[in-house]
Image: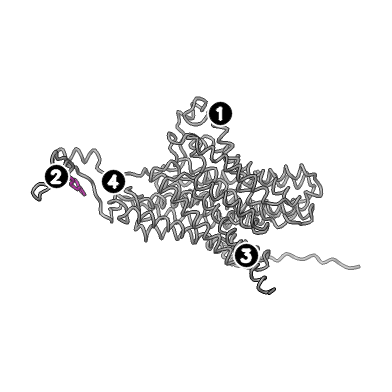
Amino acid sequence: MEQTIQPQKIKTTFKEKITILTPYISDRFMEQVRNVWMIIVYLIAFQMVVLRLPIVDSLMIALGILIVITGLMFFSEGLMLGLMPFGETIGATLPRKAGLFVILSFAFMVGLGATFAEPAIATLQLAGRYVDPASAPLLYSLLNEFAAELVIAVGVGVGIAVIFGILRFLYSWSLKYLIYILIPLLAILTLYAHYDPVLNPIIGLAWDCGAVTTGPVTVPLVLALGIGVSRIVSGGGEGGSGFGIVTLASLFPILAVLGLSFGHLALDDYYGRPNSKVALLEKKITSPQTPLPVPQKPGFDISELQQFQQDGKLPDHAELRYRGKSRLEDGKIIVENVEIVLERRFGMRAKMADLRLWDTNLVFTDKLKDAAIGAVRAIMPLCLLLFLVLHFILREKVKGAEEIAIGILFALFGMTLFTLGIFLALEPLGSQVGQNISASFASVIPYGIDGLHGPLFGSEILGQSVVILFAFALGYSATLAEPALNALGITVEKITIGAFRKPLLMQSVAIGVGLGIAVGVAKLIFHLPLSWLLIPPYLLLIVLTFISSEDFVNFAWDSAGVTTGPITVPLVLAMGLGIGSSIGALEGFGVLAMASVFPILTVLVVGLTVGKNNRATKGMEQL
């Protein structure tokens, strides 16, 4: 009789465990550093080197960046250990043990739950304090009073997108036909909102929400589910590659947010309207975050006026100017009805008013508590849903329960740290740089400065040009640093058998994102209507989609989703809102929306060019 030898566990000391784990943790930490360093260093360098302005709350921001990197490390590891195995197992098992209705219902719930678990979704809750309720009452209510409804609407949009993604996998639907339906519908709704003064300000928010949803939780989880279903039911097929579902997860949330806005407009229950909640109006809901400094025009205050009236001495930095009718007489300029005007003028290197290292208004323990509660609310319902489906509906045992439990704890801990890092670093840095960018072309007092003399670059046009070039370079460099883009490039090169090489795809997407962010910033600077910037490119995309092959359409439309990572979204959104608030724009949304449409354009155009060149080469070979 053969004896079964039980393997013995190797006992290790605590020191040996640390020695074994240190290289692994170090690799994971440096992986996250490589993902985030480009955009953060670029923002800081632009403010300190080009604008020559200090980073206020620098110690808090530095600590916040470290917390963000650590949080992303734990969160990513937690996803791989805790959530992804659930999605892959259920995706492969569900079609064999459940009908189509159960599959689609579960797909909807996964899309909804994954949205709540997205780290970047917390950024929407910070945006409310940038909005003036008097000028944009519905937008203000959506971001404050109806903030929970807004997140749910985005989640419902993603859930519906996952349903259509599963159906597309099952029946090999062409992505083109879904685009032909969704884009014209969104264009019509956007045009309708454009001509309504209450709805107009929500256009940017709605389209930006499409960029927030395609993050590190939603994309891999729904892809794992969708591809697992397609392999079992349809045996692969055209939809089995997984392309297209990211596009749908970007478009349906836009539709959902527009629908939510139309609903509240019909109910007439937003800020300042008869059906709004009186208690909320009396409180004048404000975000619990630290209030933003109000951008000011350089000038004298009442105390300086009183001092001048008392002693007649010119205040510091005063400049005399004469105002009145003037004429030329015998080579002399004669000024009549003279009015003397004293204006405050600062030099280019203005006095630093605030070089604090930490925002004293921020209570660290409160932020940590809010982040932890938010992480539990976001992740645990999704984990519970996956467990219940696997255990009670599919009657499958949870394989590797210990690893999954550790993964869930890692995800909770990581999301807590990441959300705390948004509070401490990403949102303050983005809004600070956004407000200070405005000082390059407008006479506003930058963050932490007593005042300054006109635009930093001396010319408004030069300052605006520098800002737009900065926006392009920011989008271009940050996109090339996205690890998801590198993975997409490898996949596309395999699918096209080398016709569309990885470097060409990465450059095409990066240029598209750079152009998109540049156009989005120009929209804020020149107060351009977002609808006029969005609708023409999307109509052009319909034409390009029609004449492009199915493969190119699939990865071109999905390429926009890989550019909106958990770091890029909070920073770019906060930067846009900061620029908008400092120059008096009605709202600062729309930059992410433009960064989503232009990569699709550039990839499709390059794809058509590559296809044309390949056909020409084959023709020459045949001759």
Mark 4 and mark 2: span between their CA atoms?
31 Å
Q: Which residue is mark 4?
A: 298
**Pointer 4 or 2: first along the chain:** 4
Say which amino acid is labelled 2: Arg
Please tell me the numbered disc located at residue 366: none
Mark 3 and mark 2: span between their CA atoms?
69 Å
> Residue at 49% across / 34% down in the picture?
198
Q: Which residue is mark 3?
A: 612
Q: Nearer the viewer, mark 1 or mark 2?
A: 2
Asked if labels 3 and 1 touch by Cβ distance under 8 angstroms, the answer is no
Say which amino acid is labelled 3: Lys
Q: Is residue 178 left or right of residue 479?
A: right
> Residue at 14% across / 40% down in the picture?
338
Mark 1 and mark 3: span between their CA atoms?
53 Å
Asked if labels 2 and 1 touch by Cβ distance under 8 angstroms, the answer is no
**Pointer 3 or 4: first along the chain:** 4
Say if 26 sits above or below 122 in the image: below
Within-10-Å neighbours for mark 1: few <14, some 14–19, many 20+ = few
Q: Residue furthest right?
A: 1
Q: Which residue is mark 1?
A: 267
Secondary-structure class at tag 4: loop
Please tell me the numbered disc located at residue 327: 2
